[in-house]
Image (spheres, coloured by chain):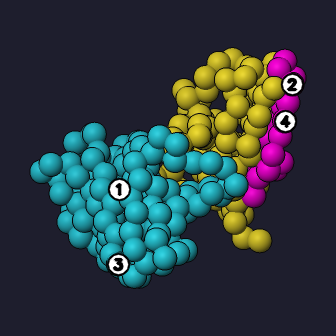
Chain colours: A yellow, B cyan
Amino acid sequence: GAGVSQSPRYKVAKRGQDVALRCDPISGHVSLFWYQQALGQGPEFLTYFQNEAQLDKSGLPSDRFFAERPEGSVSTLKIQRTQQEDSAVYLCASSSRGDGEQYFGPGTRLTVT
Amino acid sequence: GESVGLHLPTLSVQEGDNSIINCAYSNSASDYFIWYKQESGKGPQFIIDIRSNMDKRQGQRVTVLLNKTVKHLSLQIAATQPGDSAVYFCAENDDSNYQLIWGAGTKLIIKP
């Protein structure tokens, strides 16, 4: 498909485990965003990439969160030593430019037990 | 699907009627506004946008109204259909910042 895809769609992790969430943006989109969405709330910004450069990581809640986009396409959000408060839906969005319309993937629902 | 809307404002509308969803935005410097629709288990989907040099913009069955004086945005959906059931979010930003500021969301329920 031509849209943004994310995998896995659902992830259950035991507290303390590391997880890696993958985002495949729309081909050619230079901008990529990661968001965290708690139940019943709007998405909260985590980090922003322009090509392979991470221009803003101000929304990452702790140093346990790490994101990369080494070749300017696929991105991975990694959470180390997961905690229960990390349980949320993690959304990825891509855009043809930083201030343009963002296209969202379906999200990965992370549940930490 | 996920159980959204436990604490969301909810709007119930009869099928076929028009829906109006409201949003108050916070930043007077914001000059770009977007409405997103999020169905259960899916990511937000772009509906319509408007820039601050306009006060009204129409799409297919949707109209966005912007009142900069009172910092208010509304989304009007004509002839609401069951497929319109979702949570609707407004988002804002200014051209100097790529970050979107998201509103709280409104859950739209369609009554048959």
Disc 2 residue type? Lys
Q: In this view, does B65 lie to the left or right of A28?
A: left
Nearer the camera: disc 1 or disc 3: 3
Mark 3 crowd level (few <14, some 14–19, many ≥20, 10 Å Cα): some
Q: Which residue is drawn at 74% across and 20% down?
A: A83
The N terminus of chain B: image quadrant:
bottom right
**SS at badge 2:** loop
- Give the Cα distance between marks 1 and 2: 39 Å
Q: Mark 2 points at which residue?
A: A14
- The residue depicted at 52 percent of the width and 43 percent of the height is B6
Which numbered tag is attached to residue B17? Answer: 3
Q: Do the residues labelled 1 and 4 touch (CB within 8 Å)?
A: no
* Classed neighbour count for the residue bearing mark 2: other residues with Cα under 10 Å, few (<14), some (14–19), many (≥20): some
Reading the image, the residue beneath label 4 is A12
The residue segment tinted magenta is: A5-23
What amino acid type is highlighted by mark number 1? Phe
Question: For residue A34, which numbered disc appears in the image?
Answer: none
Question: Mark 1: which secondary structure?
Answer: strand
For mark 3, name the chain: B
Residue B103 seen in this snapshot: yes
Do discs 1 and 4 belong to a common subunit?
Answer: no
Q: Earlier in the sequence, mark 1 or mark 3?
A: 3
Query: Which chain hosts label 4?
Result: A
Q: In this view, does A68 lie above or below B41?
A: above
The amino acid type, in three-letter code, at marker 4 is Val
Q: Is residue A11 magenta?
A: yes
For discs 1 and 2, the disc positioned in front in the rendered view = 2
